[in-house]
């Protein structure tokens, strides 16, 4: 009689490891380094609303207003930022980089596109998107 030992936990662990790191070990090193460089920095947003507007606040510490662009394309509000580190500085320790970022917000139909305002203060970009009055549905009679 043959005894079979089944180690489902070990098999699952190996599968998880291969799924997570399998691609990493089969790529050329220069491709891995380039992918790591292209990871965008996280730009966190808080979005709130009141009766008059939507308020979008983005945390962008270290970015000046010249580093940020805001575009409205149909109903998409696109916020982009780009800044590069000073290459002349020799760091003793470097824990963060300035990279580019892009956030896209889909706006509802009830906004005043021509009255959107933005300002920055203390590393917070504040975008105010005014609302329009919600149009009541129109009933159409069939003749």
Image (spheres, grey):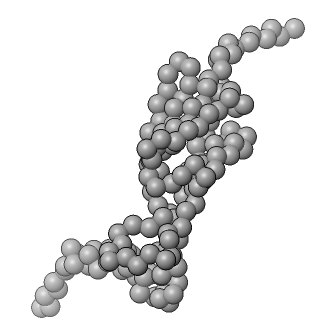
Number of labels in the image equals 0
Along the line of sight, the residue nearer the viewer: 90 or 51: 90
Q: Is residue 108 left or right of residue 143?
A: left
Seen at 52% across and 84% down, the residue is 31
Q: Give the quadrant of residue 90.
A: bottom left
In the displayed image of the protein, which residue is found farthest to the right? 143
**Is 65 displayed left or right of 45 in the figure?**
right
In this view, 103 is above or below 116: below
Instruction: Establish if 22 lies above or below 80.
Output: below
Residue 113 quadrant: top right
- x, y (%) of residue 4? 17, 86
Left or right: residue 137 versus residue 101 is: right
Residue 104 on image: x %, y %: 59, 48
User: Relative to 10, is 94 on the left or the right?
Assistant: right
Residue 63 appears in the rendering: yes
- Residue at 63%, 43% in the rendered image: 77
Q: Between 44 and 3, which is closer to the camera in this rendering?
A: 44
Quadrant location of residue 25?
Answer: bottom left
Task: Determine if residue 45 is in view.
Answer: no
User: From the image, which quarter does the C terminus lie in?
Assistant: top right
Of residues 141 and 71, which is closer to you in this image? Answer: 71
Q: Residue at x 47, y 31 (%)?
A: 48
Q: What x and y, as percent, mark residue 141?
A: 80, 8
Q: Examine the rendered structure and indicate whether residue 54 appears above or below residue 106.
A: above
As drawn, 95 above or below 74: below
Q: Residue at 27% across / 74% down in the picture?
A: 12
Question: Which corner quadrant holds the N terminus?
Answer: bottom left
Residue 79 locus on image (x, y percent): 60, 49
Q: Nearer the viewer, residue 10 or 20?
A: 20
């Amino acid at each position: 009689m043959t005894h079979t030992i089944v180690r489902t936990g070990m098999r699952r662990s190996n599968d998880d490891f291969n799924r997570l790191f399998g691609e990493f070990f089969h790529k050329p090193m220069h491709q891995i380094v380039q992918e790591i460089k292209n990871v965008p920095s996280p730009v966190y947003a808080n979005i709130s609303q009141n009766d008059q507007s939507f308020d979008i606040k983005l945390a962008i510490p270290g970015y000046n207003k010249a580093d940020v662009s805001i575009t409205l394309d149909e109903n998409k509000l696109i916020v982009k930022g780009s800044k590069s580190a000073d290459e002349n500085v020799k760091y003793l320790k470097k824990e963060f980089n300035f990279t580019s970022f892009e956030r896209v917000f889909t706006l509802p139909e009830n906004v005043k596109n021509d009255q959107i305002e933005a300002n920055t203060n203390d590393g917070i970009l504040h975008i105010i998107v005014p609302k329009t009055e919600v149009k009541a549905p129109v009933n159409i009679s069939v003749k």
